Amino acid sequence: MLVTYNWLKDYVELTLPPERLADKLTMSGLEVEEFSNRYAYLDKVVTGRVVNIRNHPNADALKICRVETGQDSCEIVCGAPNMKEGLISALALPGAVLPSGDIVREVDLRGVISHGMLCSARELVIGPDASGIMELPPGTPLGLALGKALGLTDWVFELNVTPNRPDCLSMLGVAREIAGFLGVPLKYPAISFEESSDKIEDQASVEILSPDHCPRYVGRVINGVKIGPSPFWMVEKLAGVKVRGINNVVDITNFVLMETGQPLHAFDLAQLEEQRIVVKTASEGDRFTTLDGNERIMGPEMLMIRDGRKAVALAGIMGGLNSEITDATRDVLLESAYFAPTGIRRTSKTLGLSTEASYRFERGIDPEGCRYAADRAAGLMAELAGGRVSRGVIDANPRPAKKINIPFSPDKCNAFLGTAVEPGAMVQALGGIGLEARIDGARFMVEIPSFRVDLAREVDLFEEVARLVGYDEIPVTLPLPRGGSAKPDPMRRLMDEVRGILQGLGLSEIITYSFTWADFCDRLNLAANDERRRTVRIINPLSEDQTLLRTTLVPGLLEVLKRNNSFQVSDVALFETGRLFFNRDDQALPEERTAAGGLLSGHRNALSWHEKPQPVDFFDIKGTVEELLQNLNLPEPVFARRDLPPYYDRTQAAGIYFQGACLGHLGRISEPAAQAFGLKQIPYVFELDLEKILSGRTARKSFSSLPRFPSISRDLAIIVDQAVAAGEVREYINSLNQEFLKEISLFDAYAGKELQGKKNLAFRLLYRSPDRTLTDEEVNALHRHVMDKVLARFKAGLKSLS
């Protein structure tokens, strides 16, 4: 948003220099990104005297004049009718940039080099005269920068207005803020015009068929306008904020837009069929040509302004070629409306079309300012375009804006800000920016003006007080510390433990996005009823690859492996801890779970001269998980091949169980899943549910002294079906709860052709008593009991160990 110092002075008495004003605006919340001398371009335009004139040898309309600029002189080719010897004028030197954007250069004009340009006042946008070159007073010093010679000073401020402050997207809005922190009154421009005897209802009508998109539409008719150039003062003000002058009627709409923040549009009334306006949304596929000459395809939610038969404007964004103001225009229908921000924002984004009007409508304009802006523009058209303002005004207002009142407590405000501002000073400061407070019992009630769309709560008023008092005036205070400390979060502590253990095992931690691909469930070949398909879709995703919240850590692990492989890194050991999100149709927020996952790929050890590289296998990933759970006080988990996710290779995968609860899964990724993720090598992966681990682990590690009495071991070798897992046998022996049985170890497994669908499993069982030495007879009896139970449970046979 651009504002100029001189234009602001029309509405507020400015006593601060530009530099100080920039600081005050920034401290009030209107950040000044840049402020510059508006007439800096005049630094390369100097005063010069014409000392000699001669005819151009090749052009009758041109003259060659020698111009001196104090110590130097140069030849200039010029055709101005008022050029004469002794005249002091404005000389643009090579390199000067004119307001039009043209750069002055040394040029060859019909065989004569011109070393600059003598300028008119209009070319430099410092006066309306374009009939000849500038004529400066005879005593003007030579070689002086023109801005300094004429005393031209103005400053342009580029403001970074936050989206919640659309009221500051105008000169009056910024002036109101200045008036507030300076404590001076705001001067609104006077509106004065006489209405003619022509009645507006006889010339135009307005019908709103989409009130949700257009709650208010104000129209004025101005008859008998004469299209022509705008007065210089208006062109000069618009040029200061980089708005190009077009003609007096269009310039007036732009001037009022920049002054009040209310976008306006002027229709040629003669071009409106049936002299009426209909506000309604477009139909799918409608085509409309906007003022920039581009044909655009409309959608069903795009709001259009139509006459009796056709569309004439894209509401809130741009008018159409079929109703624009031309030199032949005599009667004008002036539009001043309020359009819903969401609709304008959606249309502007869809069409890729942004204008000064849409920029303001998207953020929310003042619905109560429509009538004021229409009257202001109508008065200017009567004054500057010779128009007659028809009697009456069209004001269609199907959805009137409701007034908002917010309670305000000065004591709470001071407590919140850490200040000691007097209540009267607060009320006066708020009143300075249009927030009038009245006493309501023991408190104040502040009526929120319609232009402040950002104020909805009492704390918002506290911020207004802070801005107006000045953030730099608020004392620095330290909050009183409270005794005690917050109870540590058990899950956070568990995650820290998991990270430390896995890092100690040689895995590197990664952090990936919680967002993932829309097709990750299909890549993992998940069943239709798999809970991992309860995904949450992101409304506004960062990219097409990040449209869902993850329900498993596996896709992120595989993607990081793929990226490492693309950089020729094949030996990868990594892990991640993070949140998973599951959709709950009956609730707005998803269910969140915490998980840990890891991946091993490539070789077990680094390349070395003294041993061959060995690839990682199932037992590496299993050993990693066993070590992790052991350190988390979850000893001896059970690994069973059941309930496996479909993205694991069923021959090399297992579920992880502890006390009957499934903590997760581990194993080799299946070849189809690896191909779906574009992997060159197939990794081993584990994923654990940290919520279940937290609920299942013991709070503290227990200590037991070293055994004092010797142990006795017995071996158990059995022949079972191929389908029986060694872990299942081990788990069953444990479940027998033998008093003196301390350890169970599998030390041999064999499945040859001669066993015909069977396999041999050999276990070593260790027996020990904590308070005496067991006898062979006792151990044999215990072992016999265990053996009989196992043989019966698994329909097994004994194998000789000899």
Image (cartoon, grey):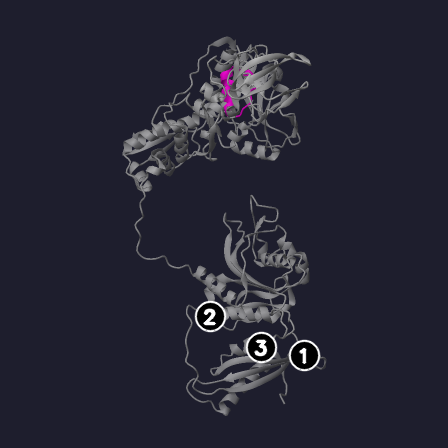
Q: Secondary structure at mark 3?
A: helix
* Residue type beneath disc 2: Asn
Splitting the image into 4 quarters, where does residue 310 fall? Answer: top right
- Distance from label 2 to label 3 (Cα)? 23 Å
User: Circle 3 sits on which residue?
Assistant: 729
**Residue visible at 50% across and 69% down in the picture:** 629
User: Circle 2 sits on which residue?
Assistant: 633
Can residue 383 be seen here? The reply is yes
Residue 677 location (% of width, % of height): 65, 56
Residue 89 forms part of the magenta stretch = no
Can residue 217 be seen here? The reply is no
**The C terminus, quarter of image:** bottom right
Q: Nearer the viewer, mark 2 or mark 1?
A: 2
Earlier sequence position, callout 2 versus callout 3 = 2
**Residue visible at 30% across and 36% down in the picture:** 410
Query: Quick check: 669 left or right of 165?
Result: right
The number of numbered badges drawn on the structure is 3
Query: Which residues lie in the magenta part?
Result: 230-248
Earlier sequence position, callout 2 versus callout 1 = 2
User: Circle 1 sits on which residue?
Assistant: 751
Crowding at mark 3 (Cα within 10 Å: few <14, some 14-19, many 20+): some
Crowding at mark 2 (Cα within 10 Å: few <14, some 14-19, many 20+): some
Q: Secondary structure at mark 1?
A: loop
- Distance from label 1 to label 3 (Cα)? 16 Å
